[in-house]
Amino acid sequence: MSRPVLHIGNKRLSTWSLRPWLALKKAGIDFGEHLIPLDQEETRDQLLALSPAATVPVLETADGNVWDSLAICEWAAEQAPSLWPEDAALRARARAIAASMHSGFSALRSELPMDLQREHTAKDMSVACWADIERMQALWAHVKTGDGPFLFGEWSIADAFFTPVATRFETYCVPLSTDAAAYVKTLLADPVYNDWHAAARLETWDAPRH
């Protein structure tokens, strides 16, 4: 296999699939795309055939399969180092904030799932969810360089990790600070993300609405 294949879940719902998809597209890497509908009778068997984790995304390459969204993004960065900031200090901060998203914010994830077909309406949130929202805005403000519209000036993997969060904030009409709202608007206006969003709106698989 000379051309890698990215196995993803439903574009409407799969935040973890969106992140490496954005990174591969931004890197200009030629790859195939295979969508595995989630929560179907055959889903688990299809995923187990790709990795022991039995989750999406999985990048199938000539050298073996890579699972986990952050690992796939790092694979892409080895082909295209510009996916991380050039400056070593900024690169470390970008990795730190991406890792924070990768492992944290459980209340936000649980209570505000990504659903790109959901009507944009607010919903009740717990104290823990509001705390996640405030902490995320504080993180964005802490690392933002001011050199461009993205967290570290030019688009990076860090922005890929927060694009699904931006969709949640829009979908659930979450009130944000002026700077955070501007960053969300930037992420959602990105033309590469908009290709994903357009496809997500056309999906017809049954899935629970939130």
Image (cartoon, helix red, strand yellow):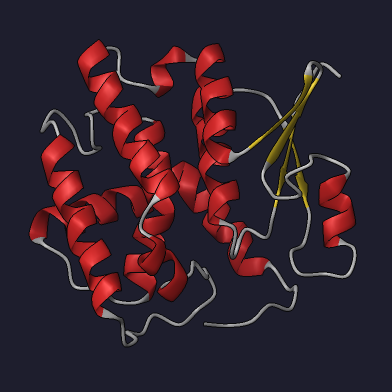
Residue at the spot x=88%, y=70% of the render? Answer: 41
- Spot occupied by residue 42 in the image (x, y as percentages of width and height): 90, 63
Regarding residue 154, the answer to whether it shows in the image is no
In which quadrant of the rendered view does residue 52 lie? top right
In which quadrant of the rendered view does residue 86 lie? top left
Locate residue 88 relative to residue 204 in the image: left or right: left
Is 137 or 170 nearer to us in this picture?
137
In which quadrant of the rendered view does residue 3 lie? top right
- Spot occupied by residue 124 in the image (x, y as percentages of width and height): 31, 87
Q: Quadrant of the N terminus?
A: top right
- Spot occupied by residue 165 in the image (x, y as percentages of width and height): 37, 58
Regarding residue 202, the answer to whether it shows in the image is yes
Residue at the spot x=81%, y=49% of the render? Answer: 47
Residue at the spot x=17%, y=62% of the render? Answer: 134
- Determine whether 106 is above or below 88 in the image: below
- Spot occupied by residue 109 in the image (x, y as percentages of width and height): 43, 65
Locate residue 75 relative to residue 158 in the image: left or right: right
- Determine whether 65 is above or below 13 in the image: above
Give the tally of numbered discs. Answer: 0
Residue at the spot x=79%, y=16% of the render? Answer: 63
- Determine whether 78 is above or below 73 in the image: above
- Determine whether 169 is above or below 161 in the image: below
